[in-house]
Image (tube, grey):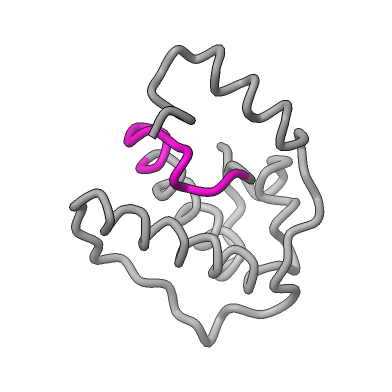
Amino acid sequence: MRIWDLEPKFLCNQHLLGEHRELHAIWSILTKNKKGYSKHPETLRWRGKLKALFNRHKAEVKEMKNRGFKHFSDLNFKLASGSSIQKNFLNSAEEQKKILKNKFCRCLLQ
């Protein structure tokens, strides 16, 4: 599971769509108190920051639409509680860029 802390425009299609799926999984775990992956570090860092996760989703959807993708899975804004800013990072932005560069995909090239 990973939600990148880089602007979605820097992600290749594969990583953008993959992050979108994982964001929905984290949202579901946190808003429905599901047990699966509830202790995963990526899930834990979004606990208490559903507004920030909602905002990340908004940015993803905007980029998806810019690329011509259709989107049908809105999040319920009424559940977007807590902080609107994510300050807890598993890797710094520079480390995340290195990780993506080592994947030999089209990330950071768009």
Taking 37 as reference, is 31 above or below it? below
**Is residue 35 shown left or right of residue 18?**
right
Vertical relation: 37 (above or below) 96 = below
- In the orientation shown, which residue stands out farthest toward the right? 88
Q: Nearer the viewer, residue 10 or 38?
A: 10
Picture residue at 40% right of the left edge, 42% below the top: 16
Q: Quadrant of residue 3?
A: top right
Task: Where is residue 46? Give x, y as percent.
Answer: 69, 58
Q: What x and y, as percent, mark residue 59?
A: 47, 61
Q: Position of residue 108 (x, y in %)?
A: 48, 30
Quarter in which the N terminus is drawn: top right
Residue 8 part of the magenta segment: yes
| Residue nearest the viewer, comparing 109 with 75 | 109
Which residue is at a point 49% across and 15% down the rendered structure image? 103
Bounds of the magenta segment: 6-17
Identified at 57% across, 70% down, the residue is 31
In the figure, is residue 52 to the left or right of 61?
right
